[in-house]
Amino acid sequence: MTSLSTLFGGGSSGGADPLQEGLPVVALYGGDFNQNWDVRLHKVHSGELVGSPWAAITNSTASYAHGQSHIQMFGYNGDHGNLSNQFSSQGYTNYQHFTQSLYQNDHYPYALFGSCSSEGRLGMHSFHTSDYYEKVYRRINVISKKGRRPRRQFNIANGVFTETNFNSNYGLKSSVDLSSTYFTPQGLPTSSSQNYGSACYNQNTKTLAVYYSSSNSTNTGRVYMFRSTLDLMDEATCPTTKDFCDAATINYITTGNVSNWGFNSLNYNLNMMLGDNDHVIFNARNSSSNRLFIEDCSSTSNVTTAAAQPESERSEGNTTSYGPEQGLMYRARMQMSWDGEWVMMYSPYYYYGSGLSAYVISVKNPRKMSYVNITQTSGGGALLPSGRSGFKYLNGLNTDSQPVQSWSLDLSSTGHDHTTNFVYAPPNYTATNSMTNVANWTGTLQNSLGNYAFQYPGYWYSTSYPRFMTVNHWKVEGNYQV
Amino acid sequence: MKLAYFNEQGKFWCWAEDQTPGPNDVNISAEIDENHALWRYNYNTETDSVEIYQPTLNTAEAEAQLEIDLAAEAAEEE
């Protein structure tokens, strides 16, 4: 008898989660965008091509489309993405360039400016409207179970916890005022209610962590922990945000100095990750500085006095860059490995989307951490989950006469014990190479870019800057997903 | 000046005071001025020396020059 898990894409092995996807796939689209352009889907870890080509080829407008789909915004003369000019310091309003930005993709199954189906049907938003970036304004981070990605969109807008239509800032589905419904009746202190998406839901523990500063322009605040019996991602048992909160016990942990600049300067926006052990990561990107803080929020009773300092912190300098203070479309992002055991909290190295400045963190134990820095200033790129337990940074540099360059990290052999070194597979692996390691928390991973022609061939022998977009459903092939 | 390690592409990897490469890691090092933006450094393995992009310019001027160079490069390739 065919199991439900197989019917719903879970593969043939027993006990697979029916909502589990196959291993990650990326849409690579490029060409010179003058006369020839193309879309391909690749398995991220191996570069294998998936899907079937079906696009027509036409010369009616001197624009030749190849590959898997028609891209309406990149047809005649590259109206919305001329790849003959390279992305570098341009912002989100630059429709000629910003599809290359590192900000395009994160752990959600759609990109900032568009989405792509599992068959390679790729659609771009109109660059003349605003909702394409507002959808990330107050969206929260989500730690998903193995092989899943968030399929509902929850937002924190000051004191209000909402669900909106997926991939949208609009289309309210449900909302609840946390302050008047829970904090005040339960005698939990509130001061500043301002919050722009500074929260993380962990599906493994059914817990939501939300951060509020004590007042404007202060670096002390509180993490409110909602430990529920319902899974926020399960619409059948948890149809509204109030249902989730009603089924939760709530307490707070007072924190000190977890943004280091005073929260006001960051527009109340911290990139947060809630680990399985209730340790909370705060990632704050402000100008050239990229900071990471961790606090133990496992107490189930109120903690009324902040420790003088966070449990641990790390700071890395970059170059001229921007964060949420310049607009929430520039907020630092989170990416998650397919197995759900690792995240990368990341932002660009340079301006609005080139290079990478990222912390690699264990979900099981966020005190297990290392850092990587890719000092590119042009071309943009994408940070994506790769294989079962890894990540890949695909670089958007010109592929004239060369393949797409990439940085890869596999964490299959990396333990979660923070008292041991951070062991990892280096990105510059050769036949004589082996595992390497750096000190936990203070170590910096190798940042060499590989040049694997088989994995990601380039486009044409002409100027071409590739774009990348996550695919909204990763098909199961064989038994890849377990 | 501060001792830095570089990767295979000649790009900055890490400061020597923070960590040392393992036995299997690329081991390219040089002293650099920590006041310059790291992206401006490139280790040239052919000459075994560090090059800095537009050494006479400050960071803002170097960024502006980078934009000009990228535009010129694109125009040349078309």
Image (tube, coloured by chain):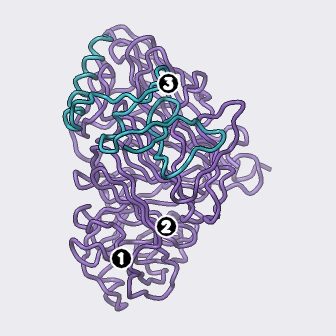
Chain colours: A purple, B cyan
Who comes first in sequence, dot 2 or dot 1? 1
Q: Is residue A326 above or below residue B32?
A: below
Q: Is residue A202 left or right of residue A326?
A: right
Taking the image as drawn, is residue A358 in sight?
A: yes
Residue A382 found in image quarter: top left
Tell me the chain of label 3: B
- Is A236 in front, or is A353? A353
Indicate which label's residue lies in the foreground, 2 or 3. Answer: 3
Indicate which label's residue lies in the foreground, 2 or 1. Answer: 1
Where does residue B3 sit, x and y in percent of width and height? Answer: 44, 43
Distance Cα–Cα, label 3 vs label 1: 46 Å
- For badge 1, the amino acid type reads Gly
State the residue at coordinates (59%, 52%).
A438
Local secondary structure at mark 3: loop
State the residue at coordinates (51%, 77%).
A228
Distance Cα–Cα, label 2 vs label 3: 43 Å
Local secondary structure at mark 1: strand
- Residue, disc 1: A256
Q: Is residue B38 above or below residue A56?
A: below
Taking the image as drawn, is residue A388 in sight?
A: no
Local secondary structure at mark 2: strand
Q: Residues within 10 Å of mark 2 (few under 14, many from 20)?
A: many
- Determine if marks 3 and 1 fall on one subunit: no
- Residue, disc 2: A274
Where does residue A421 sit, x and y in percent of width and height? Answer: 63, 57
- For badge 2, the amino acid type reads Leu
State the residue at coordinates (67%, 49%).
A412
Distance Cα–Cα, label 2 vs label 1: 17 Å
- Determine if marks 2 and 1 fall on one subunit: yes
- Residue, disc 3: B45
State the residue at coordinates (44%, 40%).
A374
